[in-house]
Amino acid sequence: MSIKVENITKVYGEQKALNTISFSVKSAEIVGFLGPNGAGKSTMMKILTTYINPSEGQVKVNGYDIDSDKKSVQSSVGYLPEHNPLYLDLYVREYLAFNADVFKVEKSRINDVIELTGLTSESHKKISQLSKGFRQRVGLANALLHNPDVLILDEPTTGLDPNQLVEIRNVIKNVGKDKTVFLSTHIMQEVEAICDRVIIINNGKIVTDKKLDKLIFQVHMKE
Ligand code: ADP
Ligand code: MG
């Protein structure tokens, strides 16, 4: 299993953001994590990437425990956070080189991720000059720098126009061919376009966990 979540609860003060959640994701699967705002998606993703600790429960990513083996979890995951914090004053290549330095990644990876995410034509520009779609690709390129086995993408397509949406979905599908991808969204069509499976979360609880072909069949049967 690439991701194994068992009985995770997260409480922020009075707010229970996640309530005894369990699920797993197999290697090379692309799974959509679907739910409305406030459902608990980002909280789950921050736990998977070791940004925050759960209040209760166990999580393993790539076989490593998020509690006892944080460093190994961090080298196994690439993370595109919800608001994709970028240094707007840096050039694309400069930004990636800076992060490659910080994470001790070989410089040759910079060209690899630029190519993988279709950034070649924009790679000489300042990040502030890029459209939202290309900024997301910079975030994705950054998440791929250390060639992680697992990608955690928090609402990677929110705010994109229809063309950019189609393009970034293709990029995600393409990089997802040999990686496990866990991506959040609040749009069902997004899941249909990219994912093999959907896990639906509402109010911190999982309400559905199904292969997409089965779910779509059930929805049509109800119509
Ligand atoms: P989603 O990503 O699905 O929109 P979040 O995981 O961001 O949901 O939030 C889940 C719930 O936890 C929401 O009710 C939100 O207001 C609350 N929450 C998130 N982060 C914090 C925080 N740092 N402190 C207090 N409450 C928080
Ligand atoms: Mg969120």
Image: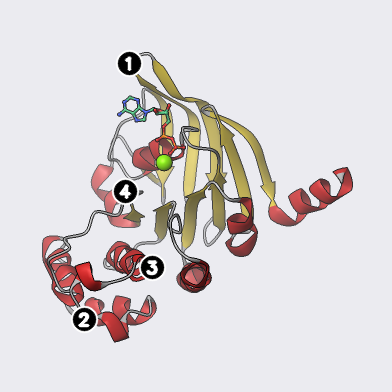
Residue at which label 2 appears: 108
Instruction: Say which residue appears at 56% left-offset and 51% top-offset.
Output: 32
Mark 1–mark 2 contact, CB under 8 Å?
A: no
Residue at which label 3 appears: 133
Coordinates of residue 178 in the picture (x, y in percent)? 48, 70
Depth order, front residue of 116/89: 89
Q: Amino acid at mark 2?
A: Ser
10 Å neighbourhood of mark 2: few (<14), some, or many (≥20)?
few
Q: Nearer the viewer, mark 1 or mark 2?
A: 1
Mark 2 CB near ligand 2 (8 Å cut): no
Coordinates of residue 196 in the picture (x, y in percent)? 63, 58
Q: Nearer the viewer, mark 1 or mark 3?
A: 3
Mark 1 CB near ligand 1 (8 Å cut): yes
How many numbered dots are placed on residues in this image? 4
Instruction: Say which residue appears at 45% left-offset and 54% top-offset.
Output: 158
10 Å neighbourhood of mark 1: few (<14), some, or many (≥20)?
few
Mark nearer the N terminus (4 vs 3): 4
Image quadrant of ligand 1 equals top left
